[in-house]
Amino acid sequence: LAIQSHPSQQTVIKLSPTVAFGGKELVIIGGPCAVESLEQMEIVAQQLSAAPVQALRGGVYKPRTSPYAFQGMGEEGLEVLATVRSRYNIPVITEVMSISQIEVVAAQADMLQIGSRNMQNFDLLKALGQAGKPILLKRGLAATIEEFVMAAEYILSHGNPDVVLCERGIRSFDNYTRNVLDLGAVAALKQITHLPVIVDPSHAVGKRELVAPLAKAAVACGADGLIIECHPEPEKSVSDARQALSLEDMVNLVDSLKPIAAAV
Ligand code: PEP
Ligand code: MN
Protein backbone atom coordinates (compact mmCIF):
# COMPACT_ATOMS: atom_id res chain seq x y z
CA LEU A 1 0.00 0.00 0.00
CA ALA A 2 2.92 2.36 0.68
CA ILE A 3 4.68 1.63 -2.60
CA GLN A 4 4.20 3.86 -5.65
CA SER A 5 2.39 2.12 -8.47
CA HIS A 6 3.38 4.72 -11.07
CA PRO A 7 6.03 7.46 -10.94
CA SER A 8 3.69 10.42 -10.55
CA GLN A 9 1.52 8.92 -7.79
CA GLN A 10 1.58 11.29 -4.78
CA THR A 11 -0.70 11.17 -1.80
CA VAL A 12 -1.81 14.52 -0.41
CA ILE A 13 -2.60 14.52 3.31
CA LYS A 14 -4.70 17.33 4.73
CA LEU A 15 -3.83 18.70 8.13
CA SER A 16 -6.44 21.47 8.06
CA PRO A 17 -8.62 23.10 5.41
CA THR A 18 -5.59 25.14 4.26
CA VAL A 19 -2.55 22.96 5.08
CA ALA A 20 -1.65 19.74 3.24
CA PHE A 21 1.46 17.54 2.99
CA GLY A 22 2.49 16.36 -0.45
CA GLY A 23 0.91 19.26 -2.31
CA LYS A 24 2.65 22.24 -3.88
CA GLU A 25 3.41 24.00 -0.62
CA LEU A 26 6.25 23.19 1.74
CA VAL A 27 4.80 22.49 5.20
CA ILE A 28 6.84 23.76 8.12
CA ILE A 29 6.12 22.51 11.63
CA GLY A 30 7.79 24.40 14.47
CA GLY A 31 7.81 24.48 18.22
CA PRO A 32 9.58 23.23 21.31
CA CYS A 33 10.65 19.68 22.02
CA ALA A 34 8.31 19.68 25.01
CA VAL A 35 5.29 21.74 26.02
CA GLU A 36 6.39 23.44 29.25
CA SER A 37 3.63 25.97 30.01
CA LEU A 38 0.79 27.93 28.43
CA GLU A 39 2.94 31.10 28.52
CA GLN A 40 5.69 29.34 26.54
CA MET A 41 3.28 28.02 23.88
CA GLU A 42 1.49 31.38 23.58
CA ILE A 43 4.78 33.08 22.66
CA VAL A 44 5.67 30.29 20.23
CA ALA A 45 2.23 30.30 18.58
CA GLN A 46 2.09 34.06 18.26
CA GLN A 47 5.53 34.40 16.62
CA LEU A 48 5.41 31.28 14.47
CA SER A 49 1.89 31.73 13.11
CA ALA A 50 3.02 35.08 11.73
CA ALA A 51 6.18 33.57 10.11
CA PRO A 52 4.17 31.76 8.74
CA VAL A 53 4.76 28.30 10.10
CA GLN A 54 1.85 26.03 9.13
CA ALA A 55 1.69 23.86 12.26
CA LEU A 56 2.92 23.71 15.85
CA ARG A 57 4.72 20.85 17.56
CA GLY A 58 5.25 20.20 21.26
CA GLY A 59 5.60 16.93 23.15
CA VAL A 60 3.40 16.25 26.16
CA TYR A 61 4.36 12.57 26.48
CA LYS A 62 8.14 12.53 26.13
CA PRO A 63 10.26 9.44 25.40
CA ARG A 64 13.24 10.30 27.62
CA THR A 65 16.43 8.26 27.83
CA SER A 66 16.44 8.56 31.63
CA PRO A 67 13.38 7.69 33.71
CA TYR A 68 14.41 10.52 36.06
CA ALA A 69 14.22 13.18 33.30
CA PHE A 70 11.06 15.31 32.72
CA GLN A 71 8.46 13.00 31.18
CA GLY A 72 6.17 15.70 29.77
CA MET A 73 3.09 17.58 31.00
CA GLY A 74 0.65 14.87 29.95
CA GLU A 75 -3.02 15.81 29.76
CA GLU A 76 -2.35 19.28 31.16
CA GLY A 77 -0.02 19.82 28.19
CA LEU A 78 -2.76 18.65 25.82
CA GLU A 79 -4.99 21.40 27.21
CA VAL A 80 -2.23 23.92 26.47
CA LEU A 81 -2.02 22.67 22.88
CA ALA A 82 -5.81 22.84 22.51
CA THR A 83 -5.80 26.42 23.78
CA VAL A 84 -3.17 27.73 21.36
CA ARG A 85 -4.68 25.68 18.54
CA SER A 86 -7.99 27.50 18.82
CA ARG A 87 -6.58 30.91 19.78
CA TYR A 88 -4.19 31.05 16.81
CA ASN A 89 -6.18 28.84 14.45
CA ILE A 90 -3.15 26.64 13.79
CA PRO A 91 -2.93 22.82 13.66
CA VAL A 92 -0.97 21.03 16.40
CA ILE A 93 1.09 17.84 16.35
CA THR A 94 2.17 15.82 19.36
CA GLU A 95 3.60 12.39 20.13
CA VAL A 96 1.75 9.32 21.35
CA MET A 97 3.84 6.61 22.99
CA SER A 98 1.19 4.03 23.82
CA ILE A 99 -2.16 2.71 22.63
CA SER A 100 -3.84 4.14 25.72
CA GLN A 101 -2.82 7.69 24.73
CA ILE A 102 -4.28 7.57 21.20
CA GLU A 103 -7.86 8.51 22.05
CA VAL A 104 -7.09 11.41 24.37
CA VAL A 105 -4.46 12.86 22.01
CA ALA A 106 -6.62 12.40 18.91
CA ALA A 107 -9.36 14.41 20.64
CA GLN A 108 -7.08 17.49 20.84
CA ALA A 109 -4.37 17.22 18.15
CA ASP A 110 -4.56 17.40 14.37
CA MET A 111 -1.81 14.83 13.81
CA LEU A 112 -0.24 12.11 15.96
CA GLN A 113 3.53 11.76 15.99
CA ILE A 114 5.09 8.32 16.40
CA GLY A 115 8.62 8.71 17.68
CA SER A 116 11.72 6.91 16.48
CA ARG A 117 11.75 4.65 19.51
CA ASN A 118 8.30 3.34 18.64
CA MET A 119 8.70 2.94 14.89
CA GLN A 120 8.52 -0.83 15.25
CA ASN A 121 6.01 -0.94 18.11
CA PHE A 122 3.74 -3.06 15.95
CA ASP A 123 0.75 -3.15 18.32
CA LEU A 124 0.83 0.64 18.49
CA LEU A 125 1.09 0.89 14.69
CA LYS A 126 -1.90 -1.42 14.25
CA ALA A 127 -3.97 0.63 16.70
CA LEU A 128 -3.13 3.82 14.75
CA GLY A 129 -5.06 2.32 11.86
CA GLN A 130 -8.22 3.40 13.71
CA ALA A 131 -6.91 6.70 15.17
CA GLY A 132 -8.94 8.84 12.77
CA LYS A 133 -6.10 11.37 12.47
CA PRO A 134 -3.05 11.65 10.17
CA ILE A 135 0.14 10.08 11.49
CA LEU A 136 3.66 11.53 11.44
CA LEU A 137 5.86 8.42 11.48
CA LYS A 138 9.49 9.05 12.40
CA ARG A 139 12.23 6.74 11.17
CA GLY A 140 13.69 4.43 13.81
CA LEU A 141 17.12 5.20 15.27
CA ALA A 142 18.73 2.51 13.13
CA ALA A 143 15.91 1.44 10.82
CA THR A 144 16.56 0.52 7.22
CA ILE A 145 14.47 2.18 4.51
CA GLU A 146 12.60 -1.09 4.03
CA GLU A 147 11.81 -1.39 7.75
CA PHE A 148 10.60 2.23 7.70
CA VAL A 149 8.29 1.63 4.74
CA MET A 150 6.97 -1.57 6.33
CA ALA A 151 6.21 0.31 9.57
CA ALA A 152 4.07 2.72 7.50
CA GLU A 153 2.52 -0.33 5.85
CA TYR A 154 1.26 -1.53 9.26
CA ILE A 155 -0.69 1.71 9.73
CA LEU A 156 -2.00 1.78 6.16
CA SER A 157 -3.04 -1.87 6.19
CA HIS A 158 -4.96 -1.37 9.43
CA GLY A 159 -7.17 1.31 7.95
CA ASN A 160 -5.43 4.69 8.13
CA PRO A 161 -4.26 5.96 4.70
CA ASP A 162 -2.78 9.20 6.07
CA VAL A 163 0.85 8.58 6.94
CA VAL A 164 3.61 11.17 6.54
CA LEU A 165 7.17 9.78 6.73
CA CYS A 166 9.82 11.71 8.65
CA GLU A 167 13.57 11.23 8.21
CA ARG A 168 15.19 12.36 11.50
CA GLY A 169 18.74 11.06 11.23
CA ILE A 170 20.17 7.63 11.89
CA ARG A 171 22.89 6.44 14.24
CA SER A 172 26.42 6.15 12.97
CA PHE A 173 29.98 5.81 14.30
CA ASP A 174 30.55 9.56 14.64
CA ASN A 175 28.80 11.41 17.47
CA TYR A 176 30.03 14.88 16.48
CA THR A 177 26.49 15.39 15.22
CA ARG A 178 23.72 13.70 17.24
CA ASN A 179 22.74 11.52 14.26
CA VAL A 180 23.44 11.53 10.53
CA LEU A 181 20.75 13.03 8.28
CA ASP A 182 20.09 10.51 5.51
CA LEU A 183 19.10 12.67 2.55
CA GLY A 184 19.59 9.67 0.28
CA ALA A 185 16.69 8.08 2.12
CA VAL A 186 14.55 11.16 1.47
CA ALA A 187 15.23 10.96 -2.26
CA ALA A 188 14.67 7.19 -2.27
CA LEU A 189 11.42 7.39 -0.28
CA LYS A 190 10.11 10.06 -2.65
CA GLN A 191 10.71 7.61 -5.50
CA ILE A 192 9.50 4.36 -3.98
CA THR A 193 6.47 5.54 -1.99
CA HIS A 194 3.58 7.89 -2.75
CA LEU A 195 3.52 9.15 0.85
CA PRO A 196 4.68 12.66 1.78
CA VAL A 197 8.20 12.76 3.22
CA ILE A 198 9.38 15.40 5.66
CA VAL A 199 12.70 16.01 7.43
CA ASP A 200 13.58 16.75 11.06
CA PRO A 201 16.98 18.47 10.91
CA SER A 202 16.90 19.21 14.67
CA HIS A 203 17.13 15.62 15.92
CA ALA A 204 19.31 14.69 12.95
CA VAL A 205 22.11 17.10 13.79
CA GLY A 206 21.50 17.99 17.44
CA LYS A 207 23.29 21.38 17.33
CA ARG A 208 21.34 24.58 16.65
CA GLU A 209 24.06 26.15 14.49
CA LEU A 210 23.81 23.22 12.04
CA VAL A 211 20.02 23.08 11.71
CA ALA A 212 19.62 25.74 8.98
CA PRO A 213 22.02 24.22 6.42
CA LEU A 214 20.39 20.79 6.79
CA ALA A 215 16.91 22.29 6.52
CA LYS A 216 17.91 23.99 3.27
CA ALA A 217 19.44 20.79 1.88
CA ALA A 218 16.29 18.84 2.77
CA VAL A 219 14.09 21.25 0.84
CA ALA A 220 16.45 21.21 -2.14
CA CYS A 221 16.35 17.41 -2.02
CA GLY A 222 12.57 17.31 -2.43
CA ALA A 223 11.23 17.04 1.12
CA ASP A 224 7.54 17.94 1.43
CA GLY A 225 8.08 19.64 4.74
CA LEU A 226 10.21 20.15 7.83
CA ILE A 227 9.74 19.76 11.57
CA ILE A 228 12.06 22.02 13.54
CA GLU A 229 12.51 22.56 17.28
CA CYS A 230 12.56 26.15 18.56
CA HIS A 231 11.94 27.81 21.91
CA PRO A 232 11.48 31.34 23.32
CA GLU A 233 14.58 30.75 25.50
CA PRO A 234 16.49 27.94 23.74
CA GLU A 235 19.12 27.39 26.45
CA LYS A 236 16.38 26.95 29.05
CA SER A 237 14.53 24.21 27.11
CA VAL A 238 13.73 21.33 29.46
CA SER A 239 14.63 18.86 26.72
CA ASP A 240 16.84 19.02 23.62
CA ALA A 241 18.12 22.50 24.56
CA ARG A 242 21.30 22.15 22.47
CA GLN A 243 19.36 21.88 19.20
CA ALA A 244 16.60 24.43 19.85
CA LEU A 245 16.57 27.52 17.62
CA SER A 246 15.51 30.89 18.98
CA LEU A 247 12.16 32.03 17.58
CA GLU A 248 13.96 34.80 15.72
CA ASP A 249 16.32 32.31 14.05
CA MET A 250 13.33 30.12 13.22
CA VAL A 251 11.49 32.97 11.52
CA ASN A 252 14.63 33.89 9.54
CA LEU A 253 15.11 30.27 8.50
CA VAL A 254 11.51 30.00 7.28
CA ASP A 255 12.12 33.11 5.15
CA SER A 256 15.34 31.73 3.68
CA LEU A 257 13.62 28.49 2.64
CA LYS A 258 11.05 30.20 0.43
CA PRO A 259 13.30 30.73 -2.63
CA ILE A 260 14.65 27.17 -2.34
CA ALA A 261 11.14 25.69 -2.20
CA ALA A 262 10.16 27.81 -5.19
CA ALA A 263 13.12 26.47 -7.20
CA VAL A 264 12.51 22.73 -6.69
C1 PEP B 1 10.90 14.64 19.27
O1 PEP B 1 10.37 14.94 18.18
O2 PEP B 1 11.01 15.44 20.23
C2 PEP B 1 11.49 13.28 19.40
C3 PEP B 1 11.62 12.70 20.59
O3 PEP B 1 11.90 12.79 18.21
P1 PEP B 1 12.52 11.36 17.82
O4 PEP B 1 11.45 10.36 18.12
O5 PEP B 1 12.83 11.52 16.37
O6 PEP B 1 13.76 11.17 18.66
MN1 MN C 1 13.11 16.66 20.86
Image (tube, helix red, strand yellow):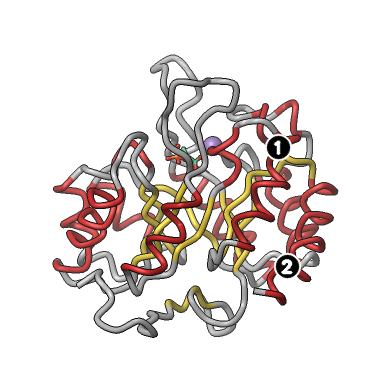
Residue holding disc 1: 210
**Residue labelled 1 has its Cβ within 8 Å of some atom of ligand 2:** no
Rounded to the nearest whole Å, what is the CA distance between mark 2 and mark 1?
Answer: 17 Å
Packing grade of label 2 (10 A; few <14, some 14-19, many >=20) is some
Q: Residue at x 44, y 21 (%)?
A: 173
Front one among 7 and 27: 7
Screen quadrant of the N terminus: bottom left
Residue at 71% across / 76% down in the picture?
262
Q: Amino acid at mark 2?
A: Ile
Left or right: 230 with respect to 91? right
Sequence-wise, which precedes: disc 2 or disc 1?
1
Badge 1, how many Cα within 10 Å: few under 14, some, many 20+?
some
Query: In the displayed structure, does residue 128 sit left or right of residue 56?
Result: left
Using residue 227 as the reference point, say whether residue 172 is left or right of it. left
Placement of the C terminus among the 4 image quadrants: bottom right
Residue 6 vertical position relative to residue 259 in the rendered view, above or below: below
- Identify the amino acid type marked 1: Leu
Rendered location of residue 16, percent (x, y)? 52, 78
Q: What residue is shown with label 2?
A: 260
